[in-house]
Image (spheres, grey):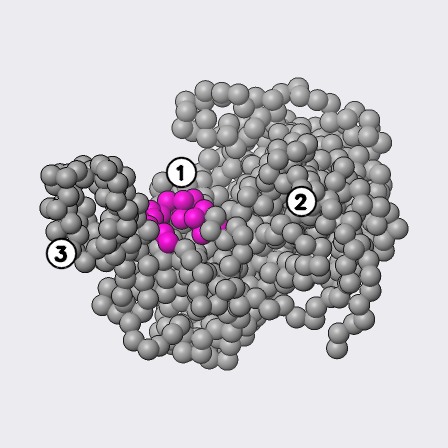
Amino acid sequence: MRHTLAVLVENKFGVLSRVAGLFSRRGYNIDSLAVGITENPNISRMTIVVRGDEHVLEQVIKQLNKLIDVIRVMDLGAEESVDRELALIKVNADKDNRAEIIQIVDIFRARIIDVAAHSLTIEVTGDEGKIEAIENLLKPFGIMEMARTGKIALKRGSKSP
Amino acid sequence: MSEKKERMTGARAIIESLYREGVEVIFGYPGGVLLPLYDELYDADIRHILVRHEQAAAHAAEGYARATGKVGVCLATSGPGATNLVTGIANAYMDSIPMVAFTGQVPRSLLGNDAFQEADITGITMPITKHNYLVQNANDLPRIIKEAFHIASTGRPGPVLIDLPKDVTTDEIDFYYPDKVDLRGYKPTFKGNLQQVKKAASAIAKSSRPLIYAGGGIISSGAHEELLKFAEIIQAPVTTTLTGISSFPSGHPLYLGMPGMHGTKYANYAIQESDLLIAVGARFDDRVTGKVQSFAPNAKIIHIDIDPAEISKNVTVDIPIVGDAKNVLASLIKHVKKTERKEWIDKIQEWRDAYPLHYIKEKNNLKPQFILEQINEVCDDAIIVTEVGQHQMWTAQYYKFKEPRTFISSGGLGTMGYGFPAAIGAKIGRPDKVVFNIAGDGSFQMNLQELATAMQDDIPVIVAIMNNGYLGMVRQWQELFFDKRYSFTCIKGSVDFVKLAEAYGALGIRVTKEDEVKPAIEKAIKSNKPAVIDFIVECEENVSPMVPAGAAINEILDLERKE
């Protein structure tokens, strides 16, 4: 079972290693982790996707809460939250298949952000499923490089934490 | 009201901050990057105990904290000084003891350069501290020190480390000590939830075989009086974990001693038969639960703990109450009624009569259990510190503790070499008490250099070595589970401990016969100086009873050695 956690932390050096260390030494698996500052420059937001049963999830949340630099931990269930991920994909492209790739990009409402003689670099945003789908369609052309941000997420509705 | 700001160096600001935290003693060892701070300590109004190895500084600070309930403070230089503290910090973390450790660090400009005596001590201690700080700006010193003492001593206590780059201690700041801490990520729950307390009270009312399983949390929260009152009202027997020993009077009719691997049979049987286990400030350690699936199979579980992460970590809890043990017990007392539970108490008395702790005396062999009984007879209100191993278990079994903070032992981490420096710390915190370090010949050799510290600062602790020539606990396991193949556990003839004590100027006494035991203890106490008593005991005595690893706690074996 995969869970998405939103973790608000003090924007201090070392906080990332405190959180990452907690996961590694207790043997919890992180699928993805994204960090960035929030509307308050003193607070960073980590979005962590973690794998485990309810017992593991409960321990993860409690252990995170024990860290002094962790201000708040929220378990974002799938229904009550919105999430997105961004990927950059550099794909082999020449004059014969460029049109076909552009068509795929259009269908996915992705963007081309760099064009070179033998490659296109594509920016795509969406949920995990969408990113995996475009990746699969682009694979036959030859993906040269790919970078994914990991998921970021917010709770739905007008309530802020 | 804020005080007036005064211009001073970072080093001075540290001393001023320590004054405001009421620090009376620091256990430390100087070094290059600490020169500015040591220069301030030279005429500061704080006692400094110069240890002979930094590990001892951390253990001594912990012993002091455990004996007094105050925050222990230790200090070590950068690099090896700091890494030598690591075992002591880990020990304090495992047993939740309040400690603030200061370490020197290379100047900020050299950080990360692999400079001389540089070690990333905040990185190294991240998993074994409650929190740690690398001070980047001298102006932050007062706030950080204030926060460190607050974090160390509140909630579930623990060690906090402050790493001090040398130039931070020489920079000048306008000193101002804050009145309050403001940590939005740290708000420990102190008061128990009233609904949960009522639920627990009703479960207690319905129970016919309740049992209290109390841990170190009773001692850290000062809840011993509430525990006694609570147990007497609901007429529930009490078993205390290793770190909970001394939180409940040993002679009390409701007291069952320690549970678990080397606990009493009757404590273990009571847990297995109980229909309601009330855990207070204890964490269901594997040495207590044995095979966890078979632990307390008939019981509902109430778990009172200040740390929410302990709830349902090892066993599933029916009624959790997060809060301070003293506060929650006081609140529970208001909701429970005086109950008689004659049948249950009688049943336990039957077990107590049928399966007492016992050992077999032998004519020509001194038994460690006998020595502990004799120490108890000569001095029944001492502070007893132990090292780790067989002697530790015998102490837990045979000394009758009467008041809290009189038993000090490395529980979670099981650190050999802990006892002697911890005893030094305890004696400094409680100079009015006789302090024994019950040791094995193995453990004592891990920090015996502290005899020099005890001599220099005139700290009269008594080291009672149960000298069996073996790393006894490991030998016991080899005897039982590895066909008596005593692989590297024999240390016979290591050293003449009497001469060793004398070399340091301490009192050394050797004891080989029963009738010499008491006079030796009396002589050591009377000498009022550091003393080492070398008790030559039976080599292959086993700690009994014993639950083999992986067994349920009622599958408990007698291992007494027959002549």
Disc 3: which residue: A107
Count neighbours of disc 1 (C-alpha within 10 A) and say few if under 14, some if 14 to 19, many if 20 or more. Answer: some
3D distance between C-alphas at marks 1 and 3: 65 Å
The chain containing the residue under callout 3 comes to A
Give the residue at x 61% y 24%: B469
Residue position for label 1: B548
Q: Which residue type does callout 1 highlight?
A: Pro
Within 10 Å of disc 3 (Cα), the crowding (few <14, some 14-19, many 20+) is few
On residue B385, the disc is none
Q: Are marks 2 and 1 in contact (CB under 8 Å)?
A: no
Q: Foreground: B449 or B357?
A: B449
In depth, the one of B284 and B208 nearer the eye is: B284
Q: Position of residue B326 (x, y in %)?
A: 56, 69
Who comes first in sequence, dot 2 or dot 1? 2
Residue B347 shows up from this direction: no
Residue A42, horizontal then vertical, whole percent: 52, 64
Q: Is residue B430 left or right of residue B545?
A: right
Above or below for B421 versus B129: above
Q: Describe the element under mark 3 as helix, strand or loop.
A: helix
Of the pair A145 and B254, the residue shown nearer to us: A145
Tell me which amino acid carries mark 2.
Answer: Arg
Q: At x 75% / y 77%, what residue is drawn?
A: B1
Residue at the extreme right: B43
Please report the bounds of the magenta region as a residue range: A18-34
Q: CA distance from mark 2 to mark 1?
A: 52 Å
Image mark 1: chain: B
Look at the numbered disc 1 and give the secondary structure of its residue.
loop
Q: Which residue is mark 2?
A: B108
In space, the residues marked 3 and 2 are separated at their CA atoms by 53 Å
Whether labels 3 and 2 belong to a single chain: the reply is no
Q: Nearer the viewer, mark 2 or mark 1?
A: 2
